[in-house]
Amino acid sequence: MSRPEIAGPASPADPAEVLEQTWRDPPGLWGRLSAVNHKTIAARFLYAAFAFFVLGGILALLMRLQLARPDSRLIGPDLYNQLFTMHGTTMMFLFAVPVMQAIGIWLLPLMLGTRTVAFPRMNAFAFWIFLFGGVMLFAAFLIGMGPDAGWFAYVPLANADYSPGKRIDIWAQMITFTETAALMEAIVIIVTIFKMRAPGMTLDRMPLFAWAMLVTSFIVLFAMPAVMLASTALITDRLVDTHFYDPELGGDALLWQHLFWFFGHPEVYLIFIPPLGVISAIIATFSRRPMVGYRAMVLSLIATGFLSFGLWVHHMFATSLPELGKTFFTAASLMIAIPTAVQIFCWLATLWTGRLVLRTPLLFVLAFFVILLAGGLTGLMLASVSLDTQLHDTYFVVAHLHYVLMGGAVFPLFGAFYYWYPKFTGRMMSEKLGKWQFWLFFTGFNVTFFPMHIVGLEGMPRRVYTYPDGMGWNTINLGATIGAFMIATSVLLFIVNAWRSRRRGALAGADPWGAGTLEWRAASPPPAANFDVLPVVHGRYPLWQPAALPDRVAGIDPGLREVLLTSVTAAEPDHRMLMPSPSPWPFVTALATTVFFVASIFTPWAVVWATLPVAITATLWFWPRRSESEQRHQREVRP
């Protein structure tokens, strides 16, 4: 195991062409199916997740059309149940978490100064099973077999007595299937952050976005297995007559809620924490100064992740749990405001002491403060047992949920798209269209969701497909429907802006915003290998600090898919490692795994017979290839 060198200014000649040949994806259809480049896989994740976001939004528009008028018969109760179940499932499982992980997979190697992510073939496999799982779920919906018990699938509503047929089986298996992808992506991100940072990028110099993705990935590792376990127990109850959730035969219906919400509340923070890193990046860049209170921000991110596991029971205040336990979870729910407040004060201090440049990404971040403040205040109200009991299952909860999730995630996400779009494509998005989109989205959001607080306080229950005339809810529901169409128009404007700017936008250059983190050192868009020479880092904002020596790594062969691994805390060079080459087997194995999960919906014997194709394709995946053996030999004999 040889150690790499760190070179000064007299480094070897530019190896860009050799690197491009080494790291690019193979051409042709088979090459596309074999791709493992992290930017290719992340872009596919982004496109797929955004397509699911649009589909979930269309489902929401259909629900709002149904609720625009009282006693409406536009959509029947069965289809409405499928609509709100698919909407929630899509937004929570097929959009929110995957899109955050996709941004991380695209950006982290650039931010950390490396060429790719850890386990690139597993990264590709995760994308294929995510895509196939989402497509299967929507295919079931389109043929009238969409799940209809809510994205929470409470038992006994979801058991075989109250939900006969295959709708809930499809939901349970596809949730387990797609969340396997989330687990794999979490492992990829954690190992990439710990072992592939550029020399000198100690944990204390790591970008806050990387810290946010690290905390999020650990939450995924501990939270996702709970919902996968719960949904597997549900389908075994339905298929092979186990009794995990049947109280008459020794099971417990509340066990479902405990398992589901042990995942479900950290899920909120899986969606919320990555945007905190996005906001820190945008604020530092457009304030023209380093983030105030870096270490406090890091500790707050870790504290938020830790506390997120202690709140799940506040979703169960209307059950028969002991009052003392509810009191504990009320206190824990209120404590989450502390690390959040620390971060907000750090952001405000940075904005206050900086020189603001008001561009579209910063507008979305400033709107985040307003929206999140409202969502946070109603969250404190719902953390109280007495208030929650009164407001449970009303539209007040719908309003709170959307203020937190859309305010905490979608607003920063649009800011992130505008901020990193030049790096993705090499061109700038239109500022004029961007500001139009922002104001339309901000106005439409508040027109849609703020009145839901009022109609919820007036007692309108959620998850009902219609309501009678004369309740005083007509005008508010009509206004909310108009607001929903304003949001849809805003999203359409964003798509037009992104599509138009890809061809006609102004050329961006490597660092159009004057940002300080490492991803802006690479060309826009970045080449296949990210960097011509691997950088050495001397501070938290390498592009804002005077050049220091050494500034680059030497000793990495541009003709091999070789990366530099560093130590976990100090990021000292450790050793070089050959990364796997492109391969079609992750795609083929994903197909076999899809057959396994789909077949197991209909027969338990699939667990026996459908594992054979998975085992065969997985074996071929790891079978040694002659070209890789030759590369290893070349590396060993190199002087």
Image (tube, rainbow, N blue to C red):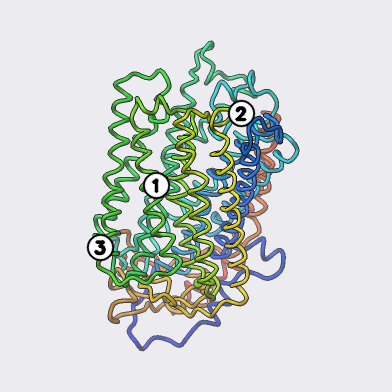
* Rendering coords of residue 388 (x, y %): 39, 28
Tell me, for residue 407, which label it has, or none: none
Query: How far apart in space, not on screen, are marks 1 and 2 (Cα)?
Result: 49 Å
Residue occupying the point 60% across, 48% down: 57
The three-letter code of the residue at mark 2 reads Asp
Tell me, for residue 292, which label it has, or none: 3
Residue occupying the point 47% across, 72% down: 636
Which residue occupies the foreground of this view, 3 or 417?
A: 417
Query: How far apart in space, not on screen, are marks 2 and 3 (Cα)?
Result: 54 Å
Count residues near mark 1 (Cα–Cα under 10 Å), then give few for <14, some for 14-19, many for 20+: some
Helix, strand or loop for disc 2 = loop
Rendering quarter of residue 555: bottom left
Residue hosting label 2 = 469
* Rendering coords of residue 68 (x, y %): 62, 39
* Residue 445 placement, left or right of 374: right
Which residue occupies the foreground of this view, 222 or 275?
A: 275
Q: Is residue 92 visible?
A: yes
Q: Earlier in the sequence, mark 2 or mark 3?
A: 3
Q: Is residue 605 visible?
A: no
Asked if labels 2 and 1 touch by Cβ distance under 8 angstroms, the answer is no
Residue hosting label 1 = 218
Rendering quarter of residue 389: top left
The three-letter code of the residue at mark 1 reads Phe
Rendering quarter of residue 574: bottom left
Nearer the observer: mark 1 or 3; the answer is 3
Count residues near mark 3 (Cα–Cα under 10 Å), then give few for <14, some for 14-19, many for 20+: some
Q: Quadrant of the C terminus?
A: bottom left
Q: Earlier in the sequence, mark 1 or mark 3?
A: 1
Query: How far apart in space, not on screen, are marks 1 and 3 (Cα)?
Result: 25 Å
Helix, strand or loop for disc 1 = helix
